[in-house]
Image (tube, rainbow, N blue to C red):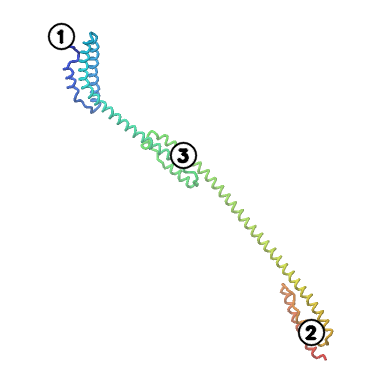
Amino acid sequence: MAKTALVEYDVTDAAIFELKDKYQGLKITDMASYKEVSCAIAEVRGFRVSVEARRKELKADALAYGRRVDAEAKRITEQLFEVETPLKVLKKAEDDRKAAIKEEKERKDRERVYKIQDKIAAIQRLVAGSFGKNADEIEQLMAQAVNTEITPEEYMEFEERAGAVKLEVFQALSEAKSAREKWEQEEKESAAEREAQKAEGERLAKEQTKIDEEKAKIELEKRVVEEAHRLEAQRIAAEAAKAKEQLRQDALKPDREKLVVWADQLLEITPPVLKNAEAIGLANTMLYRIHGIADKIKEEAEKIN
């Protein structure tokens, strides 16, 4: 059996042992150690690449030799990976830690920006809050906008934007207040006009009611007088008819009885319905005299045979 030639690579076991001894205990604690790990990976990778290059060179002679070359290369590579892989794991852990720190920083920054933007939006919402408010309430919103302090510590890079929004909101609220005051004044004047119209309507209605009542009163008095006249006419007519009948009957009686009947007729006379006090007094006086005359007629009639 032919003696197998030793496959030689530039990377020896001693060199690999030296690499293990050199890099096995590395840790990343700062930027310098991080760079050291990166350099170690690069150095080991350089050895691994040279082994791969040598493998290809030796394998070119023969397939069998190539298998030996591959086997040796695999063996060496595996040993090199034993050095490289922990270093990569170490580096990845540090890279992940830095990425997590970066992500947390970005998250906090997004949250910070959101809070600032929400504060600016709160200023803007003052305009929407003025809808349906009266002038005094809008003025309170204006004061709230003015009292909103814009500082670089609180608004940071959005300070200029916040200041511009504050000014815009104040101007919008000022315009809203002016418009509301104008509307309130017009509404006040309209209300006063409506109240005046209502009062005038009520006054005219009262006057009309008074006129209607007066007309009704006059009409009622007229009907009362007419009814009194009608009744008086009926009474007079009835008395006339009665007197006529009495005269007819009296013509058949002696003169003394006729005089007594006549006196009784005089006593039955009643005055008409009167309103004037002077007329009422006159009627009562005449009635009294008529009664006196009737009594005198009866007294003298008794003396007639």
Instruction: Look at the numbered disc 1 and give the secondary structure of its residue.
Output: loop
Q: Residue at x 77, y 73 (%)?
A: 234
As drawn, 36 above or below 252: above
Q: Nearer the viewer, residue 284 or 11?
A: 11
Using the rendered view, name the quadrant where residue 45 is placed.
top left
Calculate the distance from the C-alpha at mark 3 to the C-alpha at mark 2: 112 Å
Q: Is residue 200 above or below residue 183?
A: below
Residue type at the position of mark 2? Val
Amino acid carrying label 3: it is Val
Tell me if label 2 and label 1 are in contact, CB under 8 Å. Answer: no
User: In terms of sequence position, does the residue under pointer 3 or pointer 1 come before the other?
Assistant: 1
| 216 vs 192, nearest the viewer | 216
Mark nearest the camera among 3 and 2 is: 2
Quadrant into which the C terminus falls: bottom right
Work out whether mark 2 precedes mark 1 in sequence or the reverse, and give the earlier one: 1
The crowding category of the residue bearing disc 2, from other C-alpha atoms within 10 Å (few below 14, some 14 to 19, many at least 20), is some
User: Which label belongs to residue 261?
Assistant: 2
Reply above or below: 52 against 174. above
Q: Position of residue 220 (x, y in %)?
A: 70, 66
How far apart are the two marked residues, 3 and 1, measured between alpha carbons? 96 Å
* Residue lying at 17% horizontally and 11% vertically, measured from the top left: 6
For disc 1, the marked residue is: 3
- The answer to whether mark 3 and mark 2 are in CB contact below 8 A is no
Which residue is most to the right?
Answer: 251
Label drawn at residue 238: none
Instruction: Report the mark closest to the observer, 2 or 1.
Output: 1
Q: Earlier in the sequence, mark 3 or mark 2?
A: 3
Give the percent coordinates (x, y) of residue 152.
37, 36
| Residue at image mark 3 | 169
- From the viewer's perspective, is the residue at label 3 or at label 1 nearer? 1
